Every structure is written in structure tokens, then in C-alpha cells.
Amino acid sequence: MSKNKKVMVGMSGGIDSSVTAYMLQKEGYEVEGIYLKLHNRTDDYHESNLGYIDDVAKFLGIKYHILDLSEKFNKDVYEYFVNSYLEGTTPNPCVQCNRNIKFGAMLDFAKEHGASFLATGHYATTDGKFFYEAEDKTKDQSYFLSQIKKEALPFMMFPLSNYKKEDIIKLGANLDVAYKKITEKNESQEICFVETVYTDVIKRHANIDQEGDVLDENGNVVGKHKGYAHYTIGKRKGFTVKGAQIPHFVTKLNPKDNTIVVGKRESLEVNEVLGDNLNMFVDDKKFSCGVKLRYRTTTTPCDVEIVADKALIYLKEPAFGVASGQLAVFYDGNKVIGSAFIQSAK
Ligand SMILES: Nc1ncnc2c1ncn2[C@@H]1O[C@H](COP(=O)(O)OP(=O)(O)OP(=O)(O)O)[C@@H](O)[C@H]1O
């Protein structure tokens, strides 16, 4: 029952994309894999991933391509990541990777090679016009997909969207030894190029271990911190506040003079957010919806006004710990209607 349609599957060597390839083949698609080399890690990272992919490809009898996008990844994702922290904002590298790399350059490659669709093991759904949250809310990745250009959506397939991660692991473990081996390896890291903590990556490019002053909201010096790039908005540890009886939270980072501002929990409260770099799936300029201001959080009801290329987001309930650089993703129920990068909040 061949569907006579070629689907390229982004294969990472992990269980999700390996099962994705299997499912699509079972459905009758002609499947080919693509492995992206995204960074120049010195360990055997790529060799190890390709070992797993090769075994899966042999089991399925499919061919796969290796595409070196490390230069583009370095510019669009890695440098952006490092620079954001140095500028005192909190980057979202997976969002940039999805937009520019996976559903940018990898999609172009898939189309050039005659594929009708590009499939990945992301947990989300699409109907070609919108993204929707995945059934398994604990794994949902719609937040990270919300900056993808709308022209890319008709080519995207997420076959895992109706499953739970544990079902995928069970399916893999019982399928073949090529899959079983993958289920037995460690789960991949949250950010593929961060092997330990993000500050280890930043340290390769700048001396971030420079002690600085901790300020209160009136500009008074109240303590010391170990270098502003070690902190993100809402963090409550790793700095001193003289005589403090209750927890203090980081509310602002000042890269220019290497100071950080701290305050009580109330000072993290935000009622208005300004977003830029809009990516909208609807044309409305004024609407009410729910907004997620970071990953793994519930939506906050809000009114949104789009003015030129900015989104003015008026929250109907206060949010806490909103960081510039993260995404504000607009949801109508479980449907993603657009997103913007958080420029400022008050
Ligand atoms: N290096 C890569 N080359 C090609 N596709 C990739 C690569 N890394 C990730 N992908 C695709 O993007 C999807 C989501 O990536 P993510 O890093 O969130 O992986 P994951 O949920 O751990 O999935 P997997 O178990 O397949 O690694 C993967 O399922 C895969 O289809």
C-alpha cells in the first residue's frame, strides 16, 4: 500500500526519531533519513549517533544522508546563545535551531531531494496551518516550534504526537536489537551542545567569573555576586544580600557594570510584556488568548495588540520571573497562534 510519497526523517540517533522512521515506513511512505552535523564536538558524539542510525537504517532498509550544517548552526544558534548570555538575556537555542536549521536548511535539503514531507520526533501536532500541543503535555514541544515560518508547516509531520514517550520506548525495546540498544543509552541532554551547564560554554568565550555588586531596587549595594552571566531572572541563589531574612530573587542583570539587581518575590511580578520578532499564524492585530512566557508553565490569560512588528501583551493575571530573550507563545486553547521574543517586561 505504497503512498508513493517520499518522507525525509530528521534522525538524531535517539529513540523518538528512530521510531518515527519505523512508523512512517509501516504506513507505506518511502522513508529516507537525514543526520545533521550541528557542532564540532571533540568527543565521539557524531560517530556514536551515526552508529545507532546506521543500525536502524539497516533494519528498515532505508538510506540516509549526512548533512553538515555546523557553520550555519554556529552562526544562527551557538553564537546567538553565547552573545545572549553576555548581553544579560536568556536565549532559547532550540527555538532558533527549529526555525533556521531543522525546518529551515534541513527542510530545503529534503525538498531538493524530492521529499513531500519532513518528519521529526517532536511531540506536537500540525494540520499544515497551525501547531497544536501534543497529547502528552509533559513532553509537548509546541513552545519550541512556534517561531517556524508558516510556509514550512504544510511539509511537516510529527508521527509521535498522539503517543506518550514511555509507549515509544516500549515499542522500540520490542522492535529489534538496533532499537533496543537506543532505549538503553542515556537520554540526550536538554541542549545538544551543552554537555554540563551553560556557564561552561560561555566560559570558553569570556571571563565571566568576575565578582560584582548586588544592588537593591534603589541602587544601594547590598552584597556580592560571582559574575552577572551566572544568573538569570528569578534566580535566588549564588549571591549574598547583607542581613536578608527572606529570599531575594534576581530581577535585572546589568552587563555594562557587572551588577545584578535583586528584590523580594513581589518585585518579580510582571503585568505587561513587550515582544519583538513576531511570528504569527493569524492575521488579527488585537486578540485575547493565553500566553506562555517560558517553557514548562501554564498559560496566562492576556490581551495582545500588534503594533508594527511588536506585540504589546497585557496580562490579566501577574506572571513572575519573566526573562528577556525567552519566547512569549500565544495559545488559543491548545492551538499555537503565534509567538514573539520577550524584549522587556514590567
Ligand atoms: N542531529 C540531528 N539530525 C537530524 N534530526 C535531528 C537531529 N537532532 C534532532 N533531530 C530531530 O528533531 C527531533 C527533536 O529533537 P530533540 O533534540 O528534541 O530530540 P529528542 O526528543 O531527544 O528525540 P530523539 O529521541 O529522536 O533524539 C528529533 O526527534 C529528530 O527528529
Image (cartoon, rainbow, N blue to C red):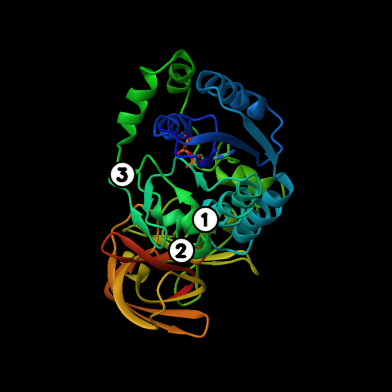
Residue at x 47%, y 25% (from the top left corner):
186
The first of marks 2 and 3 along the sequence is 3
Q: Position of residue 182 (x, y in %)?
A: 47, 22
Q: Is residue 335 left or right of residue 62?
A: left
Spatial CA distance of label 2 from label 3 is: 18 Å
Circle 1 SS class: helix
Number of on-image labels? 3
| Image x and y of residue 312, in percent | 41, 81
Q: Nearer the viewer, residue 13 or 315?
A: 13
Is residue 256 among the parts visible in the rendering? Answer: yes
Contact between labelled residues 1 and 2, with CB atoms less than 8 Å apart: yes
Q: Residue furthest top?
A: 177
Q: Residue at x 26, y 63 (%)?
A: 333
In the figure, 336 relative to 183: above or below? below
Callout 3 secondary element: loop
Judging depth in this view, the residue of 120 and 27 nearest the camera is 27
Q: Which residue type carries mark 2? A: Leu
| Cα separation between marks 1 and 3 | 18 Å
Is residue 271 shown above or below 61?
Answer: below
Asked whether residue 235 appears in the rendered view, the answer is no
43 shown above or below 196: above
Percent of width and height locating residue 33: 57, 34
Mark 1 highlights which residue? 95
Amino acid on which the number 3 mark rests in the picture: Thr
Residue under label 2, please give it: 327
**Mark earlier in primary sequence (1, 3):** 1
Residue closest to the far bottom: 307
The quarter of the rendered structure image containing the C terminus is: bottom left
* Disc 3: which residue: 138
